[in-house]
Image: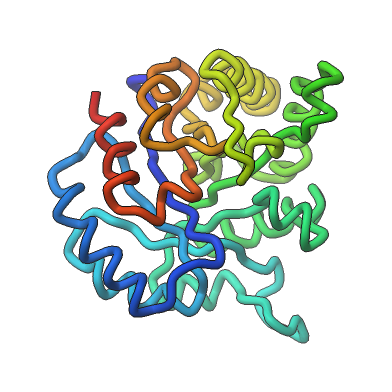
Amino acid sequence: MAKRRIVIAGNWKMNFTPSEAEAFINEIKPMVKGKRKCDIVFCAPYVTIAAAQKAAKGTRIKIGAENVHYEEKGAFTGEVSAKMLTEIGVEYVIIGHSERRQYFGETDHTVNLRVKAALAAGMKVILCLGEVKEQRLSGITKEVVSMQTKLDLEGVSAEEMSRVIIAYEPVWAIGTGLTATPEQADETCGQIREALAEIYGKQIANATTIQYGGSMNEKNAAELLAKPNVDGGLIGGASLVAAKFNAIVDAAQI
C-alpha cells in the first residue's frame, strides 16, 4: 500500500448549486490544508464545476466531473464531452457509477467507451464497479467484479492505467446506509487487484489505487482505510458535510 497513492474523492451527485459549492469549498479548505498523505477530489455537477474550481484555486483540492460522454461532439442532448471538460481544467471524472448503471442504462460497453474517451483526452478516471445484493448472496462477487474489471478496461493500455483509479462499490451499500465489513471490502478490492494482475501483470495491479465506495463515512473510514487493499474512498453523503469529509481525510493521514 505504501507504493499506492491514497485518494479521498467526494461524489456530490445531484447536490449543491454553484453558490453552495463555493461555500462548501471555502469551508473545507482550511480544514484539509497541510494534509498531504492523500489526494483530495470533489466530483461536482457540471454547473457547479467553475464555482468549485474558483474556490479551490491555490489549494491541493481537485475538482472533477461525475460523468463524461464517449463522443467528442454530436447530437447527444444533455451530454458533455471529455474535450469540454479538459478545456475548463477538469482533471478527474467518475465513470460507471452504480446510479448511472441502474437509472440511466449504462452498460459495461458504454462504460468502456467513456473510459477510453476520457483517457484519450488526458483525464484521470475513477472507474466504478461492484455487485448487487443478489450476486453477493449468491457467492459470485469475485466473478462479477473480475468480469467488470476486464470489460470496463478492454483496450486500455498498461501505460494508461497510471491514470485509472478503481472504486469498488457494492451496489447494495450505495445510499442504503449498509456498508461492507472491512474484511469484505478488503477481500473484494483484492479480487479486483487479482483481475488487474491477469490483464496487466502484478506490478501494475499493485500500483493501482482501489477505493472503497460503499457508504464510507467518518465513523467507519479508519477501519476501512487500514485494510491493505483499500487505497481511499469514493464518498457520497459524507462528502456534503465538511466536518464529516475532513474526518475521513484525517483517517487517511495515519
Count of numbered badges drawn on the protein: 0
What colour-coding does the image apply?
rainbow
On the picture, is 172 further left or further right than 82?
right
Q: On the image, which quarter does residue 50 sit in?
A: bottom left
Residue 124 pos. (x, y %): 48, 52
Residue at 20% across / 47% down in the picture? 32
The residue under the point 41% across, 51% down is: 239
Examine the rendering and report whether any part of residue 201 can be seen: no
Q: Nearer the viewer, residue 1 or 230?
A: 230
| Quadrant containing the C terminus in the rendered view | top left
- The structure residue drawn at horizontal position 64% and vertical position 61%, both measured from the top left corner, is 117
Q: Is residue 40 in view?
A: yes
How far across and how far down the image is residue 114, in percent?
68, 59
Above or below for 95 versus 206: below
Q: Taking 49 as reference, is 251 left or right?
A: left
Asked if 126 appears above or below 206 in the picture, the reply is below
Query: Which of the image's four quarters has the N terminus?
Result: top left
Residue at coordinates 51% horizontally, 18% vertically from top-left? 182
Q: Quadrant of residue 16?
A: bottom left
Q: Nearer the viewer, residue 251 or 77?
A: 251
For residue 241, above or below residue 193 = below
Above or below, 82 against 235 in this view is: below
Query: Percent x, y for residue 208?
Result: 50, 31
